[in-house]
Image (cartoon, helix red, strand yellow):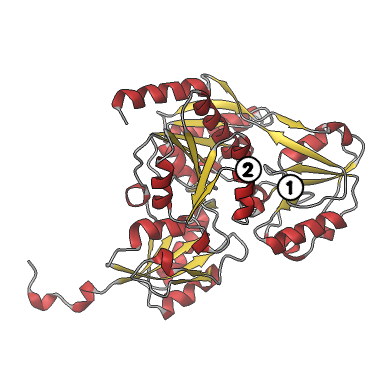
Amino acid sequence: MFPKDLLSSNQFKKKRVVIMGAAGRDFHNFNVYFRNNDAYEVVAFTATQIPGIEGRVYPPELAGENYPRGIPIYPEEDLERLIREYDVDQVVFAYSDVSHEHVMHKASIALANGADFRLMGAKTTMLKANVPVVSVGAVRTGCGKSQTSRQIAKILKDKGLNVVVVRHPMPYGDLRKQICQRFATYEDLDKYNCTIEEREEYEPHLDNKVVVYAGVDYEKILREAEKEADVIVWDGGNNDIPFYKPDLHIVVADPHRAGHEITYHPGETNIRMANVVIINKVDTATSESIHQVKGNVRKVNPNALILEAASPITADNPELIKGKRVLVIEDGPTLTHGDMPYGAATILAKKLGASEIVDPRPYAVGSIKEAYKEYPHLGNVLPALGYGEKQVAELNETITRIPCDVVVIGTPVDLRRVMTIHKPTVRVRYELKVLGPVSLEQVLDNFLGKVLKHGK
């Protein structure tokens, strides 16, 4: 016991917190740890990476009774001001797909302004499911999580199991309407006014007749998903760690960005946690880069099973490409904060003999033009950015302005479903093909055997 005169009121003062995020991990960390925690007062969120997600309020319906007015969301550029004006005690970093150096720059801002800097791990953020969970993560955006999740869901479904996919959050609209979303049909995508980025992730699962859940409150989502699932597949976003405690954690690495598996946050965390690491795209990567990724994985997680996989690329109407001037459109997040200068559509266009890949930058408008300024590594490729109706319209206008013979679409969603493209189009697809040393079916059979043995 401490003497009473040493127990000042300051010792019981709530710690003031700012959570740095991008409308995903930040909201989850708040919901599961801070929402009903009387030791803390979250005074603000900051937002980055996704255009237009700041300037909103995390609503009272989600924030809880301690926050009757909700919690304001500011641009990340306001962080220093917020720390000073709110006398912040703690800054929580809660977004993904950034370099270790980037994280420490943000830590330095917090520390220099007198606040503690915090990263939250599995014990405080992972929820426990009542059904088995297979999680799919990655070391960077664009490694091939989506194609891996699709194949895992299909394998499990073919075994007669009721499979439900829970997708990492992308709540870019009205948060009150996105608390718990269930997608079973294409009409559900329209019902929730899904962005291109959301459609890219949900639509391929719907093609395979697999139900998808997403939203903001992932405990509520989990309890709803459990009602209809024999097994849940966690389909991760960026390179974030799972929100649900996995029984099997599969992580995808990309030899086109060799070295990033141990230099990006929280991708390295995923590698260290992984039961299985899939080195994808070995069909288009150099043997040196594949060897480098393997070496790095073995160094930090020697117990992980390492599989190699290819991403064979196919297309409808491939004959339209040869000798033509083509516009290449690739997955937006992979190109932007994923730092990839190209994707599958670029590879295919070159392979099939396009006479020219047209530079879209001189014709870009609005937020698409701004994206090229923000991500200078982008070259003769158009990122499929569509975080809202205005941006979708700007993307469509940009496509219309570009002088080309053919549009080559390398996005997971068919852009022709959300806009009219007045030029011939080629749709590029890519699927996961595990090459060994064992198959993905064998991995999942082994997992199911352990689950049945232990009775979860």
User: Which of these two is toward me, 212 or 307?
Assistant: 212
Say which quarter of the image contains residue 184: top right
User: Which of these two is toward me, 422 or 225?
Assistant: 225
Residue 318, horizontal then vertical, whole percent: 83, 32
State the SS at label 2.
helix
> Hey, what amino acid is under mark 2?
Glu
Total marks shown come to 2
Q: Residue at x 56, y 68 (%)?
A: 54
| Residue matched to label 2 | 203
Determine the CA span between mark 1 and mark 2.
11 Å
Mark 1 neighbour class, 10 Å CA radius: few under 14, some 14 to 19, many 20 or more: few
Residue 207, horizontal then vertical, whole percent: 63, 36
Residue 353, horizontal then vertical, whole percent: 87, 34
Quadrant where the image shows the N terminus: bottom left
Mark 2 neighbour class, 10 Å CA radius: few under 14, some 14 to 19, many 20 or more: many
- What label sits on residue 290 in the rendered view? none
| Residue matched to label 1 | 417
User: Which of these two is toward me, 162 or 24?
Assistant: 162
- Do the CB atoms of the residues marked 1 and 2 lie less than 8 Å apart? yes
> Hey, what amino acid is under mark 1?
Arg
Q: Residue at x 77, y 40 (%)?
A: 346
Quadrant where the image shows the C terminus: top left
State the SS at label 1.
helix
Relative to 81, is 421 on the left or the right?
right
